[in-house]
């Protein structure tokens, strides 16, 4: 079951609160209007009962009342007049079938005739006739149930504007809140689009005052991160420069010593030593490349480049390694692509990708480099016949000094980190995917570079 997240939004909280307030307001207005209107109607009806009774009291003779002929519901909306003689006998009534008894108490009272709730409850005004008149008592009634139904109807009529106004007011509030939170959404997109190694300070412009402390805390954290990245980058650069000179000196000394090594065990040990120094020299070079890629103060020269020429240069540069390991490396360029970029950056990107492919594929196998169109994009695919890469490791493959535990080939773990840095700089996308044979077995790795 998914967690209920509707109320986690400030906008949704505000709208929900306003809905509750509107409903409470509508309920309060209904109650207030019903009771106020009821008091007004009750006072007016009581006054009318008294006036009707006073009008009939002025008669000296008992008149013959014409019974009202209408539906019972209509009769309940009328005033019912009853005339009693001095012996408390009912002599005339405008609704004879209403058997309402004479009230012993003079003035206003409530009377229930029958057992049907408010519809059988009547408001009664009773007064004696004038001296010398044949009318002993006048009793005038009106139905309380009808009056209450009228009060309810009037109260509901008064609520119609409030009910109609509710969605309109909520829409206006929603639009206002949406406009206020638009700047927050822009800020969140700006944060999401930042580069991991080169975050920039978030602007305060247009943001609500309540959010400014959070933005200031975020900018403070970015300052600390930039300082940490700068220290790390400076350390890498200093370490690489410090190591470069002695490693180069050791390499030259090994070259001079090579001619004095006798064949046999000494030669084998010397080869291992030379291979270790070569890996160290490669690691130093990679460290320098990492520090240069992350240093945005260094502006690389941008040229108009034909991508197929850059790929051919990388393949030619690595052809010695391919021949040494018996790897058949091929290039297929079915598309042409020209871009504005740094040649050294592109060479660093493709040298690392093609070099990795040749490093991890078995001797005597193949590495294919393809420049072609896929859908609406131009891509470069580098496909090898190696063991592939664990799916769980692909998300971390571009981190520094990270190598798959299944890979036996030697490497520094910096190549893909450099690839990612160059790709981000030139708005490229790099994706890793295993290749499968018809039996579903991993038969290699495909690295796809999607060009902008």
Image (cartoon, rainbow, N blue to C red):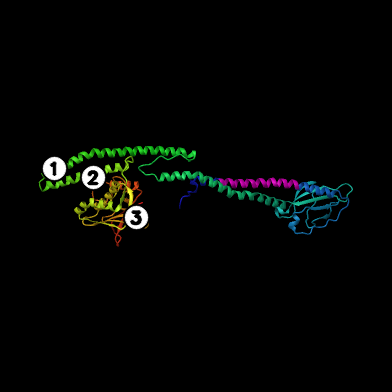
Q: Nearer the viewer, mark 3 or mark 1?
A: 3
Q: For mark 3, what is the residue?
A: 378
Query: For the residues marked 2 and 1, what is the alpha-carbon distance in whole angstroms?
Result: 20 Å
- Judge left or right: residue 408 versus residue 40: left
Location of residue 83 in the rendering, given as x and y in whole percent from the top left corner? 83, 52
Q: Nearer the viewer, mark 2 or mark 3?
A: 3
Query: What's the residue at 64%, 49% (across, down)?
Result: 159
Which disc, if any, is residue 15? none
Q: Tell me if label 2 and label 3 are in contact, CB under 8 Å.
A: no
- Judge left or right: residue 38 versus residue 422: right
- Judge left or right: residue 35 versus residue 229: right
- Residue 295 lies in quadrant: top left
Spot the residue most to the bottom.
Answer: 438
Which disc, if any, is residue 282? 2
Query: For the residues marked 2 and 3, what is the alpha-carbon distance in whole angstroms?
Result: 31 Å
Q: Give the extent of the magenta segment.
A: 18-44
């Amino acid at each position: 079951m998914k967690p209920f997240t509707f109320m986690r939004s400030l906008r949704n909280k505000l709208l929900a609160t306003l809905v509750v307030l509107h409903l409470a307001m509508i309920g309060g207005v209904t109650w207030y209007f019903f009771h106020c209107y009821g008091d007004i109607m009750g006072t007016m009806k009581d006054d009318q009962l008294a006036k009707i009774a006073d009008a009939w009291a002025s008669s000296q003779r008992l008149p013959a009342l014409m019974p009202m002929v209408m539906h019972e519901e209509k009769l309940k909306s009328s005033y019912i007049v009853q005339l009693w003689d001095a012996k408390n006998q009912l002599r005339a009534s405008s609704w004879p079938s209403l058997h309402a008894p004479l009230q012993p108490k003079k003035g206003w009272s409530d009377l229930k005739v029958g057992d049907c709730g408010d519809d059988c409850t009547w408001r009664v005004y009773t007064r004696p006739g004038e001296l010398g008149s044949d009318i002993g008592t006048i009793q005038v009634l009106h139905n309380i149930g009808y009056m209450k139904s009228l009060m309810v109807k009037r109260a509901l009529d008064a609520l119609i504007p409030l009910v109609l106004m509710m969605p309109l007011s909520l829409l206006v509030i929603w639009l206002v809140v949406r406009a206020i939170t638009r700047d927050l959404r822009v800020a969140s997109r700006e944060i999401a689009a930042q580069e991991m190694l080169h975050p920039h300070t978030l602007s305060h412009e247009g943001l609500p005052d309540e959010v400014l402390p959070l933005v200031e805390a975020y900018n403070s954290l970015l300052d600390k991160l930039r300082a940490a990245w700068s220290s790390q980058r400076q350390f890498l650069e200093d370490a690489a420069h410090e190591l470069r000179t002695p490693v180069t000196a050791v390499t030259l000394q090994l070259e001079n010593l090579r001619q004095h090594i006798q064949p046999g065990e000494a030669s084998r040990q010397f080869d291992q030593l030379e291979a270790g120094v070569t890996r160290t020299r490669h690691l130093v070079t990679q460290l320098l490349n990492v520090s240069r890629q992350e240093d945005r103060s260094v502006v690389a020269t941008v040229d108009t480049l034909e991508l197929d020429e850059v790929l051919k240069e990388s393949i030619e540069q690595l052809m010695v390694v391919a021949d040494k390991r018996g790897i058949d490396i091929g290039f297929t360029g079915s598309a042409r692509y020209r871009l504005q970029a740094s040649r050294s950056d592109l060479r660093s990107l493709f040298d690392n990708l093609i070099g990795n492919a040749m490093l991890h594929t078995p001797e005597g196998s193949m590495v294919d480099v393809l420049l072609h169109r896929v859908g609406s994009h131009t891509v470069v695919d580098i496909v090898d016949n190696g063991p592939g890469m664990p799916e769980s490791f692909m998300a971390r493959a571009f981190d520094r000094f990270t190598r798959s535990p299944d890979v036996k080939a030697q490497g520094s773990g910096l190549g893909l980190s450099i690839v990612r840095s160059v790709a981000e700089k030139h708005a490229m996308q790099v994706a890793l995917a295993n290749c499968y044979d018809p039996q579903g077995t991993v038969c290699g790795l495909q690295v796809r570079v999607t060009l902008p």
